[in-house]
Amino acid sequence: MSGFNGGQGPRSPNDDSLASSDTWVGDQGAEDPSAQNEKLDTDIDSPHMKSEPSESDHKHEDQRLKVEEEDTHGRPNELRRTIISFNDGDPENPYNWSWGKKIYILLCGIVAVVNSTLGSSLPSGAINYIGPYFHVTSDQQLVLPISLFLVGYVLGPLFFGPLSETYGRKIIMLSSFIVFTIFTMACALSPNWPAFLIFRLICGINASSAIAVVGGLYADVFGDTVIRGRAMAIFMAATTCGPMLAPIISGFVSVVSWRWTFWVGLIVAGASMVFLVFLPETYGPTILKKRAKRMRKETGNPNIFARIELEKKGAKQMATVTLMRPLHMIAYEAIVLFTCLYLSIAYAIFYLFFEAYPLIFEGIYHMSTGVAGLAFLPILVGAMIALATFIYYDGVLQRAKKANAHWASIEEYRRLPLACFGGPLYVISLFWLGWTASPNIHWIVPMLAGVPFGIGFMLIFMALLNYITDAYEVFAASGMSATSICRSIFGALLPLAAQPMYHTLGIPWASSLLGFLSLAMCIIPFAFIKYGDRIRANSRFCQELKERKEQRAKEHEELKGTRDESTTNELETGER
């Protein structure tokens, strides 16, 4: 799942805004990559050079390069480095690409995440055939093919997010997708139960690449914050398609052979790989790195660099940013802690349904595995309604901003009302499902509980992930990382308790227990609306963010004044 920037998607390092960052539903790398592209106060415009530039040359440059003089040996001007960056209208800047190319990139992200989430629940409709084949009868063990896949969702983003900020988006997405495809085939060929579980874990680790990287992928190409947010909303709605379609596929196909469930997954992945093969590189610093390398070769000048080439990203930095900071935010940031708690419970219940629905629709209504898989479709319908609701509300918010409405300037009122609406719907759906699942009530009644469930589930995620990004901006990647880790852990563990809970309490009271738990959680967005401003005022991260923005604003004004003075001097020189 993805992170948002106030409904506007994660910021990209292609953006030269004062508080730019590269954050998402799982992009967990450096917190402030704006440093990769910011123009230095001492930069001087320079062309694609044939030789070492002189000061007189700079006055006639084409604005494509920025030059920074550095004293690297303690002696001024001994080494002159040319630092390149995007300028306005640069055709290689992803923000300036055609709409056709951007839509293709949007589709690539959707295709990748549908494969990822499809793989997560693919065994759900086949487990009744997989278990007997491998002579596995324990209910806890039969949950492991899905749970271990979700464990991969915990581990993968810790590496794929930072790696995509070092080597670029395409190579990480394509290579991980290839490994995912290979081990999907390995699942189909599994010789025994332990091998099957190991293959599922590896599949989950590599499938998480889409969750970790696609948010940054969209931030790279969509410069307009409104369009970016809506693209991210479409992406997030797509994350529900895979889990809802997988039980239908496996339910019908596994009747022939459970191995064919994974052969179908392999066919879908193989067809989808074509999209990723032709995916262009979108990460701005990586594009500039390739340009600098090409220019060094063409000009013979070894001192041309992209900003990313001069950065030091070691294991210590990765450990600090990707591991320690998210854990620190969970421990000390109330907004992050309670958001993690709410999203983790909601996410775990979502995956627990893959254990509960067969008990209801196969156990009570005696449906076949394939037909019972169709019961998940109302959840998908609800997710699409939630997407439409989000886009409508986003339009209301944008009009309110243009009209300078006071509520539109308050962080807590921008997105949290969606969670205040979605939370109660989520609770109602759980009681609805539990108390209408009876042989005396038509199967369509409990099945339709999936509609409010899908609406509530999506609105809760859209609202709270947006709020995290609004509140923490350049630190949002760590906040998103914290929510991703927590919800994947809960999603892997809670379904292990599904069978014992439903058998002990019965379907009505087991569903009610989940409903009461969700009822307690749905208070959280209301509490954020009432107390969120005070919580942010006492937050160390929010205060540091405020100081950074003030400092950058000051530096921006000083830089602007320096450039204006330089322009005035050049005009006066020209007149003379």
Image (cartoon, rainbow, N blue to C red):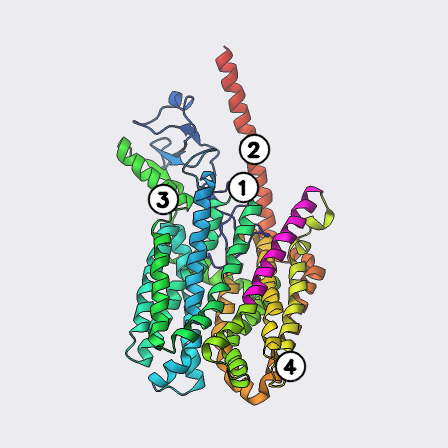
Distance of label 3 from label 4 (alpha carbons) = 60 Å
**Amino acid on which the number 4 mark rests in the picture:** Trp
Q: Quadrant of residue 504?
A: bottom right
Q: Which residue is mark 1?
A: 17
Name the N-terminal-most of marks 3 and 4. 3
Query: Considering the numbered disc 2 on the image, is that residue within a helix, a strand or a loop?
Result: helix
Could you tell me residue 6's position as x and y percent? 59, 52
Specify the quadrant of the image occupied by residue 179. bottom left
Task: State the residue at coordinates (38%, 45%).
Answer: 286
Compared with 163, 64 (above or below) is above
Q: Specify the label residue 435 is tagged with.
A: 4
From mark 3 to mark 1, how far is it between C-alphas? 21 Å
Label ID, residue 558: 2
- Kindly indicate whether the residue at mark 4 contacts the one at mark 1 (C-beta within 8 angstroms): no
Q: Residue reaching furthest bottom?
A: 504
Residue placed at 55% from the left, 74% from the top?
349
In primary-sequence order, the first of circles 3 and 1 is 1
Badge 2 density bin: few <14, some 14–19, many ≥20, Cα 10 Å: few
Q: Is residue 123 visible?
A: no
User: How far apart in space, not on screen, are marks 2 and 1 (Cα)?
Assistant: 15 Å
Front residue of this view, candidates 77 and 410: 410
Spatial separation of the CA atoms under disc 2 and disc 3: 27 Å
- Picture coordinates of residue 148, whole percent (x, y): 41, 74
At label 3, the amino acid type is: Glu
Relative to 141, is 238 above or below?
A: above
Alpha-carbon neighbours of circle 3 within 10 Å: few (<14), some, or many (≥20)?
Answer: some
- Frontmost of labels 3 and 1 is 1
Percent across and percent down for residue 357 are: 53, 78
**Amino acid type at mark 1:** Ser
Magenta segment? 379-403
Q: Which residue is mark 3?
A: 309
